[in-house]
Amino acid sequence: MPGPSPTPPQSFLQIVSACDNYRIASPGDEKVVPWLLFPTQSSPAVGLLRPEIVAQLQKESQSSTTPSWEFGVDASGQCQWVSFAFGIKTPAARSRIMKELCERWRDTGLWPDEVGPRKWRAELYPVYRNPFCQRDYPKDDGGAEDDTLNYAFEMERSASGLFGIVTFGIHMSVYEEVPGEDEPKMWVAQRALTKQTWPGYLDNSVAGGIPAGLSVFECVVKEAMEEASIPEDVVRRYARSTGSVSYFFRTPKGWLQPEIEYTYDICLPPGSGVDPRPLDGEVASFRLEPLLTVVGLVRTGLFKYNCSTVIIDFMIRKGFITPDNEPDYQEIVTRLHGRFDYDKWISP
């Protein structure tokens, strides 16, 4: 599969807007309904469902003697919300339902571009009651029966867009400061052409989704070695947490992906001897580029959509994008830290 072709140069705001491209109840959009933990409107909402997903869940419930789903239907017969059924009230029970459902959809050919065998990740993502609260996790198997945590359940990564759950990842910028120069150089990764998503696009130095049960920083350590061959001791010594970016992305096929990416920097000291190198096959190559060269690649659409936002955030933090040189500065900063219209999820 070929990689991306350059686009005409875009502004920073255009780039951010292409990533943060969805708002609930926009004029002309299809109606989405909240996915609730419990069959009451006071329940936390953990995702957003498109009509075709609601229709499939209704179809499966009608043919089951023990349905896994409840539907809130108004007087006109329109579904207003979907939840797990009564009795499915622990993380273990919800995770089991989602495992069976996602595997069934994979094996029967439903939405093959999302959960088909070629797209299947065999990696579990956590789902939280509140995506802006604690990232906790059961300490043992027995804890999966305890429903007092913010952690609510886990599910197959590739199905996250079908259910509109908030997903989490890490993105780390590895860069070097050049003595006597104001402009740093940044290590840029090129995604392998065999990647399931965005093959051939440019990527941040290190990036990856955070699987269930792994802390944010341990994910940084893991991905740095697996993707870029950066030793653990280097990451633990030099990596610095720098915040997060968050955006509401709708894929070209209409699936909803609200995402939070925790950002990290590593400034490699002179003579460190550390050069990122591919290891696990997800990255085809790395190259060290001046920041202005990286900006040109960002502006012409050669980076994966969310990686561009991380680089823009890096440039803001380092003072390369300022209120004086960027007319859309405040709009950009605000859009880089969105809340996915979360307050509307219960009654979108």
Image (cartoon, grey):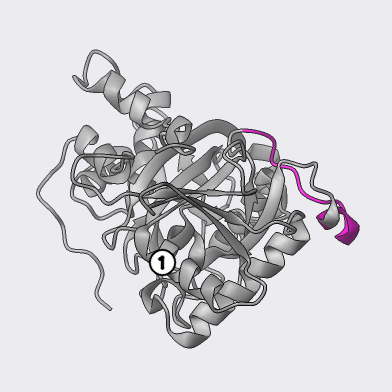
Where 230 sits versus 128, above or below?
below
> Which residue is at 22% across, 64% downward?
4
Q: Is residue 124 left or right of residue 289?
A: right
Q: Position of residue 102 (x, y in %)?
A: 56, 73
> Which residue is at 50% across, 78% downward?
105
Q: Is residue 139 magenta?
A: yes
Asked whether the viewer can see residue 166, the reply is: no
From the image, tell me which residue sits under label 1: 55
Give the extent of the magenta segment. Answer: 133-144
Between residue 66 and residue 133, name the one nearer to us. Answer: 66
Q: Is residue 20 left or right of residue 275?
A: left
Q: Amino acid at mark 1?
A: Ala
Residue 320 sits in quarter: top left
Q: Is residue 211 magenta?
A: no
Disc 1 is placed on an element classified as: helix
Where 56 sits versus 237, above or below?
below
Residue 217 sits in quarter: top right
